[in-house]
């Protein structure tokens, strides 16, 4: 099995498939409702000029997440 | 399965006796073009207000059916889900569920969908379909979807969902006729779309549904939808005006939650997953990517610059500088016209009315007082226009993205940036722009600190004090610029300090989340922006108008009574008036700051608008002033003495006075707007006290330290 990394550790421009999301917390529920689910492909587009928050692309649209939130999202990195 | 008779059709042709205007609700994700569609459907026939008890905007309008019948349309706040996370979203949920006594449950629902982003938008549609109400799905932005290489089979979507699906381009009016036709249909089918509630939570849904039907008197289908919602609505946001659930239903809900927590069942996640699975299956046959759009989109290319590590800052500075430059230059002309207009009006009244108290009340109290606030209207309008423009183009979200890190240091998020920055021109649009901040505590903190930002009404005060500060001759430019910068940074520093303090003490909350969509850049609909601007300004005038008129009259009364002896000069009159007495009464309090009772009069009169300080100093010190030339006043201030012969306006006092104006809340319009935006007198009064207290404290330290150092 491929090793998993945190969304916050993903390189800019790289993608991964979500394989772990915390079950509790309204932040993560909202993320799920916006389509970030186990099995969803997420691409890290860029970090804000000061390094935080992050801009990700998911289901064809762009979303921001703070690093402190991204740390709890686990991914299986995708090779392009 | 046969539906209960009252659900068989959505709005069956009502018998003539009980014919009432059918109510349509507009729902959709943020940035899906919902407001544009609402404007296109209702034109200028709109009513904007608040839902009673909450500061959530209620927009209703009238559209016309194909046969010329009026249709009521409610524009509900945009949301990604019916599981509410903010007061705005809670209102959308409550109206759709019929939980609000002040708003009729909509007969039909128009679900606006951004066609370029079908999957995520369909999540809300999916929840709405569950409500068992007639739904019309509007596929908006079809042109952009085509440009992005997406082919959407609307007809097949209509077949699968069983409800009308209308492709549309709200911006240029395409599809509106078809939409009106669909809205005019006397019968609308209910959705055929069925999806399986995950087995793990099905028993809970059934039990909650039964209880909602029995104990909360919900129709069966709505009960099912609400049961499903209650399971994802973990930390449900409750707002005033929403009918609470029955005890029995709450009990059942809690017992299931306890059971699942004990067995580690991720019920909310399961539900969201199964909805998205159903949506993915649905989309598979509906959307085809023809692969023509390869490489980065236009938005991606713009963002590569606009949110770039270095260029991003440059763009931000340029945009904001352009904003302020245009506010100050463009607004100048209409401001002059308004000032001239109020003068002419006052003179006209003077000409036609006999000399007397009533005439003075009208000219010096009402017209002058209201005029001094209305003079700021052009600035306020331009600021509203720019804020609307930034929102509509999508740049607002980028500014929040860039500034989030900085704002998070004081516990706020990036969305507080634009309101705070706008407050440098005028706190009123800034405070009204805080509605984009979802978290109520963050919003309140932003409102509480926004008036610290040095607004344009303080400029005349700063300039007069700087002029008076340097003895004999012109003020060196470097001193001028340095002092101005100092005042602006003191204000901003104060705002950030108190934001930090409030977030740690009074309004402690979770660190705000920053899950925010960065919508694609779009050309702004100028009509929408202009309408938004006019509505905002209308709200300000309507809400603040009475307060402003009232306080203006009170302030006039304070300076005009009791009457001095015949032949008294204006300076003598004001000295022995109630304002003069108030100034004297205030003197012991402000003396430690180096201010005497005459300055006290200025401080009190500043409540009309801070710049009024200049004209009231003119009256108090008997100096002829005009807007362009304050030299006589400056000289008069330099002549001013304490009774014991010491100079009143020493450089230290001038500096202290400027600092007082940075921190003190001396603006009745701000107080009136904060009253409206927080829905209580508590917060504006708190703000008045803590800001003015801070002003006193800081000035005390500055003045006493200065004195001790020998200035």
Image (cartoon, helix red, strand yellow):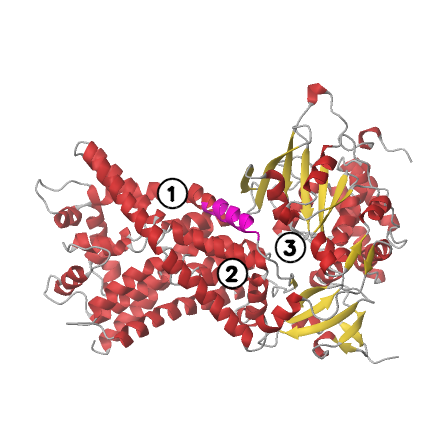
Disc nearer the start of the sequence (3/1):
3
Subunit under mark 1: B
Mark 2 on the same chain as mark 3: yes
Q: Nearer the viewer, residue B54 or B163?
A: B163
- Apparent side of residue B1 relative to residue B439 in the rendered image (left or right): right
Whole-angstrom CA distance, mark 3 to mark 1, is: 35 Å
Q: Please state which of the two labelled residues, at mark 2 or mark 3, is closer to the viewer.
A: 3
Q: Which residue is mark 3?
A: B31
Residue B626 picture location, percent across and down: 21, 55
Q: Which residue is mark 2?
A: B506
Whole-angstrom CA distance, mark 2 to mark 3, is: 33 Å
Q: Residue furthest front?
A: B292
Subunit under mark 3: B
Q: Nearer the viewer, residue B508 or B172?
A: B172
Question: Vertically, is B71 above or below B482?
Answer: above
| Residue B187 belongs to magenta span | no
Q: Nearer the viewer, residue B622 or B693?
A: B622
Residue B538 picture location, percent across and down: 46, 43
Q: Secondary structure at mark 3?
A: loop
Q: Which residue is mark 1?
A: B547
């Amino acid at each position: 099995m491929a090793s998993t990394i945190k969304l916050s550790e993903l390189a800019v421009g790289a993608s991964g498939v979500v394989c772990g999301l915390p079950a509790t917390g309204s932040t993560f529920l909202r993320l799920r409702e916006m389509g970030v689910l186990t099995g969803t492909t997420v691409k890290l587009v860029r970090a804000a000029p000061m390094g935080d928050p992050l801009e990700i692309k998911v289901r064809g649209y762009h979303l921001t997440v703070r690093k402190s939130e991204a740390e709890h999202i686990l991914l299986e990195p995708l090779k392009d | 399965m046969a539906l209960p008779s009252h659900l068989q059709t959505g709005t069956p042709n009502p018998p003539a006796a009980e014919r009432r205007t059918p109510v349509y609700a507009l729902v959709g994700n943020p940035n899906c073009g919902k407001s544009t569609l609402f404007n296109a459907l209702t034109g200028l026939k709109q009513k904007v207000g608040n839902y009673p008890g909450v500061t959530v905007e209620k927009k209703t309008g009238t559209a016309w059916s194909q046969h010329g019948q009026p249709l009521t349309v409610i524009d509900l706040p945009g949301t990604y889900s019916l599981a509410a996370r903010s007061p705005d979203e809670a209102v959308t949920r409550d109206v759709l569920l019929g939980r609000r006594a002040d708003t009729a449950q909509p007969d039909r629902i128009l679900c606006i969908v951004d066609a370029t982003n079908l999957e995520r938008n369909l999540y809300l549609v999916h929840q709405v379909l569950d409500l068992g109400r007639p739904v019309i799905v509007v596929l908006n932005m079809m042109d952009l979807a085509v440009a992005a290489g997406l082919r959407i089979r609307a007809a097949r979507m209509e077949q699968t969902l069983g409800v009308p699906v209308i492709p549309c381009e709200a911006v240029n009016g395409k599809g509106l006729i078809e939409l009106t036709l669909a809205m005019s249909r006397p019968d609308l089918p209910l959705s055929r779309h069925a999806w399986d509630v995950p087995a793990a939570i099905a028993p809970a849904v059934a039990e909650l549904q039964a209880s909602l039907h029995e104990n909360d008197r919900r129709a069966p289908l709505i009960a099912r939808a609400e049961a499903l919602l209650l399971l994802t609505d973990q930390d449900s946001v409750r707002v005033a005006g929403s009918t609470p659930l029955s005890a029995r239903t709450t009990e059942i809900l809690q017992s299931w939650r306890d059971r699942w927590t004990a067995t580690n069942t991720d019920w909310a996640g399961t539900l969201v997953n199964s909805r998205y699975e159903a949506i993915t299956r649905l989309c598979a046959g509906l959307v085809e990517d023809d692969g023509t759009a390869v490489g980065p989109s236009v938005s991606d290319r713009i963002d590569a610059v606009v949110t770039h590590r270095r260029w991003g800052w440059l763009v931000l500075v340029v945009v904001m500088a352009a904003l302020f430059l245009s506010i100050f230059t463009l607004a100048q002309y209409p401001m002059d016209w308004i000032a001239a207009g109020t003068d002419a009006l006052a003179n006209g009244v003077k000409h036609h009315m006999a000399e007397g108290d009533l005439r003075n009340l009208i000219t010096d109290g009402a017209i002058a007082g209201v005029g001094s606030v209305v003079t700021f209207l052009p600035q306020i309008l331009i600021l509203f226009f720019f804020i609307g423009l930034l929102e509509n183009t999508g740049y607002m979200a980028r500014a929040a993205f860039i500034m989030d890190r900085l704002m998070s240091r004081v516990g706020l998020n990036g969305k507080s940036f634009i309101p705070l920055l706008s407050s440098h021109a005028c706190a009123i649009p800034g405070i009204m722009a805080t509605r984009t901040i979802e978290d109520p505590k963050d919003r309140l903190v932003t409102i509480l600190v926004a008036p610290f930002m040095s607004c344009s009404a303080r400029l005349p005060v700063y300039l007069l004090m700087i002029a008076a500060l340097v003895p004999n001759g012109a003020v060196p430019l470097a001193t001028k610029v340095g002092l101005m910068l100092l005042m602006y940074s003191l204000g901003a520093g104060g705002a950030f300090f108190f934001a930090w303090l409030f977030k740690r003490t009074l309004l402690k909350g979770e660190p705000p989340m920053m899950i925010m969509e960065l919508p694609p850049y779009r050309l702004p609909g100028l009509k929408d922006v202009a309408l938004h601007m006019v509505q905002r300004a209308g709200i300000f005038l309507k809400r603040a108008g009475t307060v402003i008129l009232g306080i203006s009259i009170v302030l006039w009364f304070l300076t005009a009574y009791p009457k001095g002896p015949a032949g008294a000069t204006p300076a003598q009159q004001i000295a022995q008036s109630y304002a003069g007495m108030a100034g004297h009464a205030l003197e012991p309090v402000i003396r430690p700051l180096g201010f005497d009772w005459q300055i006290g009069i200025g401080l009190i009169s500043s409540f009309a608008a801070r710049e009024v300080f200049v004209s009231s100093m003119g009256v108090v010190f008997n100096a002829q002033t005009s807007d362009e030339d304050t030299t006589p006043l400056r000289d008069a201030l330099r002549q001013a003495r304490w009774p014991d012969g010491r100079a009143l306006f020493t450089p230290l006092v001038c500096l202290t006075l400027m600092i007082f104006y940075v921190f003190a809340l001396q603006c009745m319009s701000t107080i009136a707007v904060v009253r409206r935006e927080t829905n209580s007198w508590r917060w504006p009064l708190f703000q008045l006290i803590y800001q003015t207290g801070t002003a006193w404290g800081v000035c005390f330290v500055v003045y006493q330290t200065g004195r001790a150092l020998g200035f």
